[in-house]
Image (cartoon, rainbow, N blue to C red):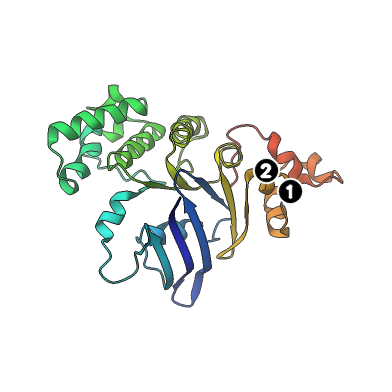
Amino acid sequence: MKLLEVKHLAKSFGDLEVLKDIHLKVDKGEVITIIGPSGSGKSTLLRCINQLETPTSGEIIYKNQNMLEKGADIRKFREEVGMVFQKFNLFPMKTVLDNVTLAPVLTKHKSKAEAREYAMELLKKVGLESKADAKPAMLSGGQQQRVAIARALAMDPEVLLFDEPTSALDPELVGEVLNVMKDLAKEGMTMIVVTHEMAFARDVSDRVIFMADGYIVEEGSPEQIFGNPQEERTKAFLARFLGDEEQKNTTPAVNAVPGMMVGTVVR
């Protein structure tokens, strides 16, 4: 069932066109990963979907309503289309538990007791129930990002947007965040993930999108994109991150991508 659709989306900052005629359909329960070089428009696309940035033109259709039309309930839309940021954005002076309960109490008008009970369930889900009373500064980056995921889940979203959720983490902390995201995917959470984690994109995605220069250059199943990409830009992007030996082979280098180690990072 189609849950979210982007049509003819464009975004410019002055004379700079960052997104150009983007089309995207997202089915309920689908995991879509967006890969591509820095500056290709990946994060801007997520910020436009969530309307943290106002698109220059186009449509964002959610549950058959264009959310860019006047009168659209943007507050409710943002409740149902949550976002996890690269930089965590936790409130530093509040405890982990308070960070997770604040929005449900203020915007969904849950009682504090109800919100705390649900928050503890979510903290257990991400492996941090023992840190409920800690302040963010007492946690590792990976733990802070897991709190940020729990905070997003506390709003009971229909869709979760992840904007490079592991790129600010030390390499040894990446796995703990990806494991939480893998569990969410298994549970059927609809997710759009901008990531440099190629193994995650290959193993968890239903569909992979490659972006460059503000366009969607190619999209398909992980098997198609990693095993048999059709566009030269996609091939060049993937080939850049293989070892010298693979690049010297006459066999297309991208065929070696499925053998990359879990946690392989593309910068």
Q: Measured from the top left, where is residue 103 in percent x and y?
A: 21, 44
* Circle nearer the N terminus (1, 2): 2
Residue 208 in sight in this render: yes
Report x, y in % for residue 204.
55, 38
Quick one: 56 or 173, which is closer to the camera? 56
Residue 44, given in percent of the width and then of the height, sits at 45, 60
Residue that carries the numbered disc 2 in the rendered image: 223
**Would you say residue 36 is visible in this rendering?**
no
Q: Are marks 1 and 2 in contact (CB under 8 Å)?
A: yes
Foreground residue among 202 and 65: 65
Q: Residue at the right extreme?
A: 250
Q: Which mark is residue 245?
A: none
Judged left or right of residue 66, residue 215 is right
Say whether residue 183 is left or right of residue 267.
left
Q: Secondary structure at mark 1?
A: loop
Quarter holding residue 249 = top right
Q: Secondary structure at mark 2?
A: helix
Residue situated in front as seen by the camera: 159 or 175: 159
Residue pictured at 28% horizontal, 65% vertical? 72
Residue beneath disc 1: 228
Apparent side of residue 118 relative to residue 237 in the rendered image (left or right): left
Give the amino acid type for the residue marked by disc 1 in the picture.
Answer: Asn
Label 1, label 2: how far apart the Cα atoms are:
7 Å
Amino acid type for the residue under numbered disc 2: Glu
Label 1 packing within 10 angstroms: few (<14), some (14-19), many (20+): some
